[in-house]
Amino acid sequence: MNKPRIDWLDAVKGASILMVSMYHVGLIMDAYGYSIIWLMKINALLTPIRMPVFFLAAGFVARSSVNRPWLYLFEKRIGFYAYLFVLWSVLRFSFFGNVVPNRLAPLEGNDWTWLISSLVAPETGAWFLWALAIFYSLTKSVESVPARVVIPIGILASVIGFSGIVPMLFSFANILQYFVFFYVACHFQHLILRLSEMPARLIALGTPVFAVLTVLAWRSSYWWIDGPAELAAAVAGVLALIGIAVRLENSLLGSVARFFGHNTLPIYVMHLTIISSVAHMAAQYNLPDHAASRLFLVVVLFLAAVVLPVVIKRFFDRIGLSFFLFRLPWSGAARKPVVV
């Protein structure tokens, strides 16, 4: 029997995918020469919470799976995410090699050795599927280790990842940064639920702390300030976002956020190919380069990024392709939708 969905949890997942989509819109705009400074600044401001809130939401629903035997966990979660990661990495590679180029990763679609290496060390937006498989594996592996031991190690790893003191591929840095959010949410659901019952305090305390620490991290040139400040800003921002999501539960904005929270998987795996296609067409038809046209392009790209994947997913549902594009085909639950 499925547990009832938690509205604010779906809403923060929706907020995460909207922030991720806007981030990639900004990157694609810049790659095609339509850069908008204010959009880049907003995306930079949201960096500390964009992915932490997603992995916290993922960890929150992971406990029942992690408590099951390894075989069950591998089929239902680890194998599922690994399969989707490989599948969509190959599909993306084929798309960018034959339809439009990927201005953010020019080798994607043009170098098969790059594809093979990216399956071990991801260099594209599909990295989050790879990360989820790793996070489930790590959390299961340390289930016999006390949380009071795992959490400090996770915090230290996160600080290192955020600080940038150790040069590494962004996907590896992200593993260090975000595992603690997944782990804490998995093991301390009750604490997060208790905090969600005081939204006004979360907003009042989390918002200014997030703002101050984010600015501090921006202005600092010291890794030992950057890392702790960004991690603390991420925690404060995530808590504030939970408070906002709870407060908006009965509003239109809350309903919209929950809708996208129910559709994170198709948006995550398809939005970059869609906005790359639209931006490529805009460049091909010589869209005038002035403020109004740039703003128009931002709106079009953003709407295409978050709406078209949902439409395409429903079309795939109708023609019977979703069972292998968004699910594990050989799983007993292949015909059932999977919550990500």
Image: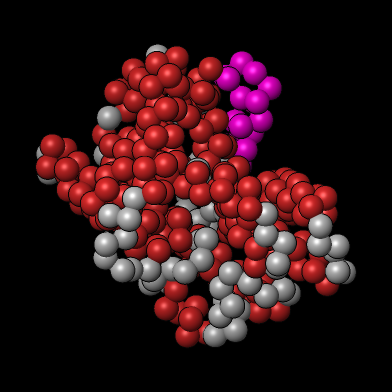
Left-right relation of 93 to 234: right
| Residue 251 forms part of the magenta stretch | yes
The one nearer the camera, 13 or 233, is 233
Q: Position of residue 184 (x, y in %)?
A: 28, 37
Q: Is residue 314 left or right of residue 45?
A: right
| Magenta segment main secondary structure | helix
Image coloring type: secondary structure
Tell me the quadrant of the picture where the N terminus can be found. top left
Q: Position of residue 63 (x, y in %)?
A: 32, 36
* Callout count: 0
Name which quarter of the figure residue 230 lies in. top left
Residue 264 in sight: no
Nearer to us in this view, 336 or 266: 266
Identify the residue at image location x=45%, y=79%.
116
Q: Is residue 269 above or below residue 310?
A: below
Residue at 60% across / 42% down in the picture? 18
282 and 53: which one is in front? 282
Q: Is residue 131 visible?
A: yes
Magenta residues (range): 248-265
Residue 9 x, y percent position in the rendering? 48, 29
In the image, residue 121 sits, relative to residue 259, either above or below, namely below
Q: Residue 291 at x, y = what percent?
A: 79, 52
